[in-house]
Amino acid sequence: MNDVWIVLIVIGVLLLVPLIWYIATMNTLRQKEVKVEEAESGIDVALTKRFDVLSKMVNTVKGYAKHEAETFEKVVKWRAGLPKELTLEQKQEFQQKMDAVQSGINVAVEAYPDLKAEKVFTNLQRSISDVEEHLQAARRLYNSNVSLLNKRIVTFPTSIVAGMIGMERKAFFEAETSKRADVDISF
């Protein structure tokens, strides 16, 4: 009778250990997925903040450069801010559009030297610099979390659990093509 109990306990342990491993692995993957979603939300916050700062800068520049209508019309189109439920690709596209707006503002600043001396404008320029740094940090955090998750998803034996729960690799937030090119500096 004691032998039967020992066999049953051994069988129970042999069945319980893989089950516990599966649950622990699944929970770890889900936690890493939540970290990726949290980091993506950080990008949303940074893009929204960037939009707000650029909108304020546009209002400041408007007073000095009324004829820069095309640039300002683009911002007015996006006055509602970062749309909800965007895919990662759409967020990257939104960022590219905001880059174009910022370039237009920079051109207006060069055309109106008095604007550079404006205290409000100088403060907004500092704000943009801070926002850009925050956005860069948010993208780095997102990509770091994606990297950690993707490593787990493709590593055996965790890949088995990932496949069973339908978890797939996440896309990295990548720089647009124009920013990958070598910068030509000439005087």
Image (cartoon, helix red, strand yellow):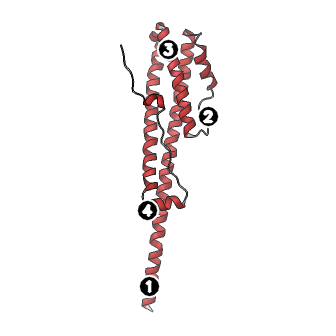
**Amino acid at the residue labelled 2:** Pro
Q: Are marks 1 and 2 in contact (CB under 8 Å)?
A: no
Ranked by sequence position, the earlier of labels 4 and 2 is 2
Ranked by sequence position, the earlier of labels 4 and 3 is 3
**Amino acid at the residue labelled 1:** Val
Q: Nearer the viewer, residue 185 or 95?
A: 185
**Amino acid at the residue labelled 3:** Val
Q: Are marks 4 and 3 in contact (CB under 8 Å)?
A: no
What's the mark number on residue 83? 2
The residue shown at (52%, 45%) is 37
Q: Are marks 4 and 1 in contact (CB under 8 Å)?
A: no
**Distance from the alpha carbon under mark 4 to that under mark 2:** 39 Å
Badge 1 marks a residue whose secondary structure is helix
Badge 2 marks a residue whose secondary structure is loop
The residue shown at (45%, 89%) is 4
Q: Nearer the viewer, mark 3 or mark 2?
A: 3
Circle 2 residues within 10 Å: few <14, some 14–19, many ≥20: few
**Distance from the alpha carbon under mark 1 to that under mark 3:** 80 Å
**Amino acid at the residue labelled 4:** Pro
Q: Position of residue 147 (x, y in %)?
A: 43, 47
**Distance from the alpha carbon under mark 1 to that under mark 2:** 61 Å
Q: Position of residue 53 (x, y in %)?
A: 52, 24
**Distance from the alpha carbon under mark 3 to that under mark 2:** 27 Å
Residue located beneath label 1 in the image: 7
**Distance from the alpha carbon under mark 4 to that under mark 1:** 28 Å
Residue located beneath label 4 in the image: 157
